[in-house]
Amino acid sequence: MTHRRLASVLIANRGEIACRVIRTARRLGMRTIAVYSDADRDALHVALADEAHCIGPAPAADSYLRIDRILEAARASGAESIHPGYGFLSERPDFADACAQAGIVFVGPPASAIRAMGLKDAAKALVAEAGVPVVPGYHGARQDPDFLAAEAAAIGYPVLIKAVAGGGGKGMRRVEGPEGFADALASAQREAQNAFGDPRVLVEKYVLSPRHVEIQVFCDAHGNAVHLFERDCSLQRRHQKVIEEAPAPGMPDEVRAAMGRAAVEAAKAVGYVGAGTVEFIADGREGLRVDGFWFMEMNTRLQVEHPVTEAITGHDLVEWQFRVASGETLPVDQAGLAIHGHAVEARLYAEDPDHGFLPSTGPLRALRLPEGEGIRVDTGVRAGDRVTPFYDPMIAKVIAHGATRDEALDRLAGALGRTLVAGPKSNVAFLKALAEAEDFRAGRFDTGFIDRDLGALTAPSPHRDAAIRAGIRVLVARENPARAGSPWDAADGFQLGEARHQAFPFVLEGEPAEAGLRWGAPGLNVEYGTDGPEPASLTVIDAPNGVLVLAEGRQIALAPPDPFAVDLDHIDQGGTIKAPMHGRLVAVLVAPGDKVVRGQRLAVVEAMKMEHALTAPSDGTVAEVAAEAGQQVAEGARLITLTTEDAA
Ligand code: ADP
């Protein structure tokens, strides 16, 4: 057979996966075409591509999910093929169909295969027929609560209710016993209706001590099919993968062979072509066993965690995708594939582990991604880019490869230790704690591992107070360059009061806080929290409103005091405005009898070369001014009295 390599590809995606696809396409000599939303005009994937087309406003529904606009960009650019990446349109059979109708090669499976695997219940029935084990359960059409409750009882508790149209863990409920079934069913159906517009569920046995083990499969259009071994994705939080590895720890050869065979059978059952992943759930109570794994679903696309498979097999899966899409046969057969060493991937996210892992957005003020032996980083952002609320807030995937699992995990932990993300909060410290967790290292884990150990995995660093002290030092130096070394160097006769000690109010993560500053022969000593050594890694970065302290993968934001907040603290019921600290009154901006409005600046106090504006807490009239500009004032000294509207 003769094959013509595809000359060009449009990547219908963004972020790290768009960049990753572009890299291989470029190496294969293909012209690369990016699409982008208004929010991604300056994104890395746009910069990397040979050309780029805007496809609409920021919300994905108006851009990355618009089949018409993407096909328009493909026609305008003369793209010969479209790679969908993962997410967005990658598992939409109508998109694959639309590409075919437009005469563009869809780099993915036939629409019929996507359709067949799209609904969990139908997919299960189909692969069960092909002899693949599926989790015992009810995967049928009846949805009345009494019937499903009876099925649950027959399956035996605990059971798992799953949305038929499910994905991303939505519409999923574990039920411990009959008493909780009705409520769990109603809420799963509600969630499924909201998320997928389809309330139907299936009920299956909840596998105990579950391990998520998936098989990478590849098929060409000539009837060849292979598997590229397994990935273990059991480290999950709320059913979402956090760390993935290949091969699976403790995988016996015969179980690997049986799973691989089952996965290839499942793919063949739907006439699969291209890259796909067959996900199994395994009972991990007594290790992985030939009779202890069941089909969950097939993902008909490239997966986020494909790099660990690339690392252990030495094959570029995106290259394979292009070869298969252009009609070539698979480059190797099963016997030609082998596992080399061990690989682990961690998903680095802009999210806040201290607040329920909520996405954390904003500009990346600094970004240092790790390099090193056996380390690969796939990213779609650079320092200065903005993490927006519109898309998945993944910053990068950090992949470590080593001769052994221990070496791979050591390299991963080391790489995470060298990673720095400033601006949005990130999960670096959490990932590093996972890579170092004793039970995980020993291979004692299942999908409940993270949730069980969440407290320890997200525990605050014992070096937090020391990190804050370091941040305060920078904050003081920045606001007060002449004074940072020693107050005695300065020639302006500035006095800090007899104790050479000063209260230093500041804002810690948005909350008012206070430290002590003490000046001595060696310079400034900051008093805050519990004494202790500084963290192993410490970087302080300037931010427009203060500093960001990066310590051991965690970020702490410090800011100078908010003048409004200070004022409110120093105003009593009678409308007396007091000096917030020892210092010099540099300006008095009002006189008795003046009418003032809330927020108006009344006076300015300077301490530590920082100016603190004192503003009116409410509308009112100046009754008295008790100090003069130029005068030294003590903390708490009465400066101005207002007659406020409420007091009057
Ligand atoms: P989704 O498509 O919503 O991500 P999946 O069917 O892929 O849902 O399941 C996601 C995760 O839920 C699995 O990785 C596993 O951790 C857990 N899970 C799924 N089915 C079972 C089951 N029968 N027993 C125990 N855990 C399960």
Image (spheres, grey):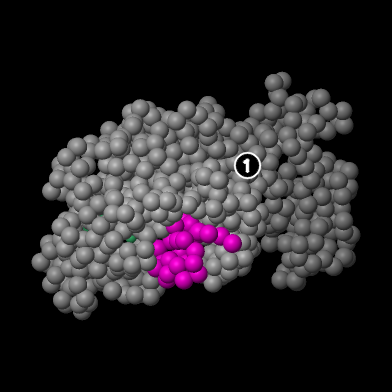
Q: Residue at x 50, y 59 (%)?
A: 82
For residue 127, above or below residue 461: below
Q: Dot 1: within a 10 Å radius of its alpha carbon, few (fewer than 14), some, or many (20 or more) residues? A: some
Q: Residue at x 82, y 42 (%)?
A: 584
Rendered-image quarter of ligand 1: bottom left
Quadrant including the C terminus: bottom right
- The residue labelled by disc 1 is 366
Residue 60 in view, yes or no = no
Quarter assignment of residue 607: top right
The boundaries of the magenta stretch are 78-107
Q: Position of residue 481 (x, y in %)?
A: 78, 33
Q: Nearer the viewer, residue 606 or 536?
A: 536
Q: Position of residue 647 (x, y in %)?
A: 72, 69
Q: Position of residue 15 (x, y in %)?
A: 54, 52
Please tell me whether residue 112 belongs to the stretch shown in magenta.
no
Left or right: where 78 falls relative to 205? right
Q: Is mark 1 within 8 Å of ligand 1?
A: no
For residue 587, above or below residue 142: above
Q: Nearer the viewer, residue 636 or 395?
A: 395
Q: Position of residue 161 (x, y in %)?
A: 25, 65
Left or right: where 2 falls relative to 23? left
Q: Nearer the viewer, residue 104 or 451?
A: 104
Q: Residue at the top extreme?
A: 521
Q: Residue at the left extreme?
A: 154
Q: Residue at the bottom extreme?
A: 144
Q: Residue at x 47, y 33 (%)?
A: 375
